Image (cartoon, rainbow, N blue to C red):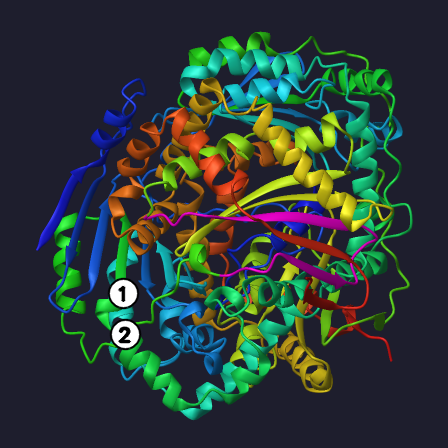
Amino acid sequence: MSPMSLSFGLLFSLSGVASAQDTRIPAYEDQVPPPAAEALAPKPKAVPAIWTVSEGTEAVLVEDHRVPEVVLVVEIPVGTYSPWLNAQHGVEAWELQMYDADGALRARADALAADLSVYCEARTCTLELVALKRDLEASVALVQDVLKNTSYDKAELKRTDQGRQIGWEGSQTDPDWRLAQTTAQLLYTEGDPRLQSYVEPEKVLRDPKALAAARDAALRLPGRRVGFAGDLTRAEAEAIAATLLPAVNPVTPADLAPAYLPLRADRPASLIEPMDNLTQIYFALMRDGITLEDPNYPAFLVANHVLGGHFFSRLYVSLRHEGGETYGAYTRGGGGATASVYSLSTFTRVENKATTEAKLRAVLTTFHEGGVTEQERIEAIGYLQGSELFDQQSPSNLLSTTLTELTLGLPPGFFVEATKRASALSTEEINTFIKAHYDPAAFSMVTVEPEP
Amino acid sequence: MISCLLPLAFAWSSAHAEEPAPSPEPTLLSETLPNGLHVTVLSDPSLPVVATQMWVQVGSAHETDSEAGFAHLFEHLMFGKTTNNDKEAYSRHHTMNGGSENAYTAFDNTVYISTIGPAWHDQVLVFEADRMRNLVLDAENLENEKKIVTEELRLRTENDPVSRLLDPAFHAIFGDHPYGHLPAGTKEDLAAADLALVQKFYNGYYHPANMHLVIAGPVDGPATMARVQELFGPLGGERLVPPTIPDLASHDFPSRVLLQEDIPPIKVAALMYIGPTMRDPDYWAFKVMTEMLAGGELDAFREELVTERSKAIEAMTVAETLRSGSVLAFASINLPFRSERRAFKLLHQTRDTLTEEAGWMTQAKLDTAKRRLLRQSLERRYYAESQADALGQAYAWQGDETFAMGGASAAIDEVTLEQVQAAWLKYVVQAEPVEIFVKKGEPKAEEVQ
């Protein structure tokens, strides 16, 4: 369903609820799934198997026979950050390939009671199909036909174009989106792919032939992966993977990889983004976050949890529990594949701006000066280790983590290993990192607030 | 008294004999304690975490006119200190062991949720029983939570145009029905809440006979049930029975509602129909009907209005179920040139086409819809929280938690094409919809004669 449909679907949804904790999903780009831990898990439920199908194609299987269902994933190694993919409108070529002119592909998915989705993220484009095991053969045939579709529905291309524009206009009145846009514009240089979500979308290409060609070229890029999860064996997965995709084209374009630009050096200490019709002020005390490959990433996991990662974090205690300035206060971002916006975020009623801003700054200053306590370190490690169990719930959880590690070029088990490394750090080592990274002078205060 | 001990793999496989039986087998144990607390324990050794949910049968729909938003405010207060534990203890137990805890207030229920590894689950029960008996309710905490909830209300309902539409839309559409105000309430009502109201909720509504404790995960069923009896058995007090919420079918809805907000330059038109409650014999046919209409990739209404006729830029079918009834809505999103009259005419024409050329209502589509619903219920087996949620809702809305397991699959399996056709006729063709129109403009919500 399009974002436009989702927004207005909400209007007709009767499941509106209010909850104790703010569970909204952070809107910033370039985030990766939270890390998993290992120490307290008695035994992993399944271990992902990884093998090379042929030159340029890798496969991953998470075998789990609890439920007679299979997940089949095709992932190509380019996404919305790729100049090459964008130049030929490859994103819409990928995302609209299931919309054939007569709707036959979606009708086949419906007949199989399958969920079929195609989408692009920053570094990958993915096709995912979930179906009952008994429909595996027909599901594989459907996936192959989607990946061969050349009859893109022109009317759907036009509607997607209209939807993009309406979605863009709608985002201008969302204060959280505007805060994310403003912080991204402060961090990244104009033209950086990481700003892409915050600039007006380009027109959708309405040429089916060109779109099919772009999709075909993308599908033949080396570095692609086929993922399987659920009720199938290694032998079944190997047989499917061997014939699922067309041969890889060994000649690859030069501009596949994202062209990241240096971060802005001229970031102001504070910035106000004015907006109509607000009864609250939205804050982001932001800087550039560390990356996954930074040696301090394990220390960051602990520090970030203590500062803004849970219901009694430093931020929550100061801004919510002591004084009721806000409903939610948390850290966002950091730990991305590349430098991304990292912020201490909250919101409050308009007349309470000064108190809230002072508290937000004070939390950072105190954290920078004193670091974490030994008890906080122990509890943060307990969190990282205990939450590993959640990653084992379904085979698709495990498949997703494994594909993320492979996509980012991380060694298998990277996230589990990161928790182990975090667990081995002393309080002093973590506080040394905090002293360097959480210097208030490195942060800018961004607010979205009502027009004066 | 133990009322049910059911190997659930059997329940699934008997309803769908052609599906391989999932393994290992979970078992369901349920019991109503002498104090009225209903307890359900789903023991599934294949799950890595334990979900614990306390379903309180009080939501925003049970509030009086002067209590709007209070069920939700009280939910926040339940995270306060007790005579045995400080305010942080419950959340800290979850955080330091990798678990999660939260709560939500909906129209019909307030639900407290916890998910954590099995090694730390017993302490969750201890905390849960403690706050049901020993919560410290004082003016200072109340005033602080009022401020917090007011910020939540501003966040959710004031600062985004579509969100701003929700509250006036519900007032305009549902009128004086208890679903006519959102769980978030109003700032004025929150400001007026006092400790007397707090005590009414805690002592009266939060009586064990108004609650259902659900536990799902790798637990020993009988041992867990015994522990619950020990911890929750002493709960009591003088029960306050929540008021009965009238079924939506008996409510007098307006014929047309106009909503305006600072939305993008589009016009949204919708026809909203009222369907049966989950306790109604028609419910499963209605449920399968909505799945046939819009459960898959192709939404029959959208295909007709948008793909076939190109008369809107987007369209959708939305189906929701609450305890007091279901809602089915057909909506279109149009460019600004589309008049209100024309937009509704097109919606009615499309509905008529779905009646006259019912390509979506075939035996093959029915079989597919059943298979899709089966797959959704099978997927829940991976997640303790999903299992607990389904058990809690089935008991709250249907009075029988086994509907969350094999019961619903069996009921769905028995639905015939004739029953679906009858449901379409009764709840759509012969029914008068509420017409809802949304456009860009100065904010307002009004019934249009």
For the residues bearing labels 2 and 1, Cβ distance under 8 angstroms:
yes
Quarter holding residue A213 = top right
Q: Residues within 10 Å of mark 1 (few under 14, many from 20)?
A: many
Indicate whether residue B113 is drawn in magenta: no
The amino acid marked with disc number 1 is Met
Q: Earlier in the sequence, mark 2 or mark 1?
A: 2
Q: Magenta part of the protein: which range?
A: B252-279
- Above or below: residue A32 compared with residue A93: below
The foreground one among A228 and B316 is: B316
Element type at mark 1: strand
Q: Is residue B218 visible?
A: no
Position of B35 compared to A109: left or right?
Answer: left
- Above or below: residue B401 compared with residue B197: above
Chain bearing tag 1 is B
- Residue lying at the far bottom in this picture: please name it: B139
Instruction: Work out which quarter of the rendered image holds the C terminus of chain B and state it.
Output: bottom right
| Disc 2 from disc 1: Cα separation | 10 Å
Element type at mark 2: helix
Tell me where residue B100 appears, x and y as whole percent: 42, 59
The foreground one among B245 and A234 is: B245
Q: Which mark is residue B211?
A: 1
Q: Residues within 10 Å of mark 2 (few under 14, many from 20)?
A: some
Chain bearing tag 2 is B
Q: Which residue is mark 2?
A: B132
